[in-house]
Image (tube, rainbow, N blue to C red):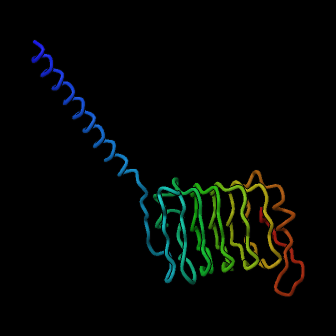
Amino acid sequence: MNTNFKYFAEIVLSASKNRFFIISIILLSFCTRLRAEIHTGSCGTNVTWAFNTETGILAISGTGNMADYSYSNQPWYSYRSQISSIKINEGVTNIGKYAFYSTWASSVSIASSITEIKDYAFKYCEFTSITIPKSVISIGEGAFSGTGLTGIDIPDTVTSIGPQAFKYCKDLTNAKEASIFYKNNRNKAQKQRDVV
């Protein structure tokens, strides 16, 4: 009787270990699938992008201009709801049209090599603040429209602001006073209409 009970206990213990082993394998497999993936590609002649699924950071690197896009053909378009931060690195000289349209980014870092932010570059992004470097001389039409901006400082180096650059920024309190007047190339105050 004791032998049978011992034999039965060994079977139960063995089954438990096997079950634990199988569950461990399943969990390990699941966690492996969840690990970070890095997606990369080109977004300009000498400009590349890399998106890290674990950190949510979309990094733009290289030299020269970014490519222009329409509202839905950016190479990272399918990841736009996973993008939490955009980092544009030194060497990149402009931000292309519709580049980050409708991404869910809550933060953006723009390198001091950027001279132009093109039309609709950040339209409908979710960030509430952004620092525009003094290297920027041009902000395109609708560049920041529909964003979550609550304030913006536009450097004196900016000589051109496109129409409706800050339209539909419902929480932006200082856009009108900050951007209706700006300095042109001759260093004279010039009126810019319809920026909000």
Q: Is residue 7 left or right of residue 142?
A: left
Query: Residue 71 lies in what quarter of the image?
Result: bottom right
Residue 158, given in percent of the width and then of the height, sits at: 78, 77
Question: Which residue occupies the extreme right position in the image?
Answer: 188
Residue at the spot 25% in from the left edge and 38% down from the top edge: 22
**Above or below 42: residue 11:** above
Query: Residue 130 lies in what quarter of the image?
Result: bottom right
**Above or below 79: residue 40:** below
Residue at the spot 49% in from the left edge and 75% down from the top edge: 48
Residue 75, given in percent of the width and then of the height, sits at: 46, 67
Depth order, front residue of 83/163: 83
Residue 72, given in percent of the width and then of the height, sits at: 50, 62
Q: Quadrant of the C terminus?
A: bottom right
Residue 179, given in percent of the width and then of the height, sits at: 82, 68
Residue at the spot 87% in from the left edge and 77% down from the top edge: 190
What is the count of numbered marks?
0
**Above or below 89: residue 28:** above
**Above or below 184: residue 102:** above
Question: Which residue occupies the extreme front position in the image?
Answer: 2
Question: Which residue occupies the extreme bottom position in the image?
Answer: 186
Q: Is residue 4 left or right of residue 59?
A: left
Residue at the spot 84% in from the left edge and 66% down from the top edge: 178
Depth order, front residue of 151/113: 113
Q: Quadrant of the N terminus?
A: top left
Depth order, front residue of 37/133: 37
Q: Is residue 54 left or right of residue 86?
A: left
